[in-house]
Amino acid sequence: MPRTELQEIGRGGEDRALAYLQQQGLTLVERNFLCKTGELDLVMRDGDHLVFVEVRERNNPRFGGAAASISPAKQRRVLRAAKFYLLRFVKMPPCRIDVVAIDGEHISWLRSAIIDQM
């Protein structure tokens, strides 16, 4: 199925985030993990840690920028998808949920940006 223009833009942001994180020493485990509870843009390894990465991109800061676009509902969906992903492990690896916020040409890597408060 062909991608929409918005999906192509999102894919470009994920490509930029992936390249940035790889430059920081992380390695890709999986991309665009889909499950019944949501989607994980990137699953990476940072040393011993499994890192779930939500990528957000905004070209216009009018509504608060990329990081501000992660609503509480979106945070819950990412948490549920990460928990679903972790069901495959017998022993839980240390993990965290990061956000890569892309505002125009500026990339911000926010470690442990989403914390499980359920």
Image (tube, rainbow, N blue to C red):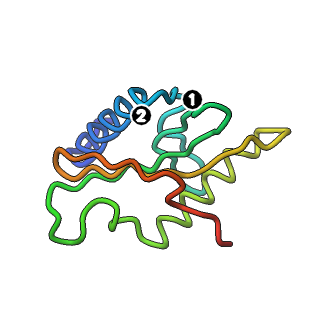
For residue 75, side relative to residue 69 (left or right): right
Q: Which of the two discs, 1 and 2, sits closer to the camera?
A: 2
The residue positioned 16% from the left and 49% from the top of the image is 104
For residue 112, side relative to residue 21 (left or right): right
Q: Nearer the viewer, residue 113 or 83?
A: 113
Quickly name the residue at label 1.
29
- Are the residues flagged by discs 1 and 2 in contact, CB closer than 8 Å? no
Q: What's the residue type where badge 1 is placed?
A: Val
| Residue 39 marker | none
The residue positioned 15% from the left and 70% from the top of the image is 62
Please provide percent x and percent y for residue 20: 35, 33
Determine the CA span between mark 1 and mark 2.
Answer: 12 Å
Tag 1, which secondary structure? Answer: strand
Tag 2, which secondary structure? Answer: helix
The residue positioned 42% from the left and 27% from the top of the image is 22
Please provide percent x and percent y for residue 36: 60, 53
Quickly name the residue at label 2.
21
Q: Nearer the viewer, residue 25 or 60?
A: 25
The residue positioned 48% from the left and 73% from the top of the image is 72
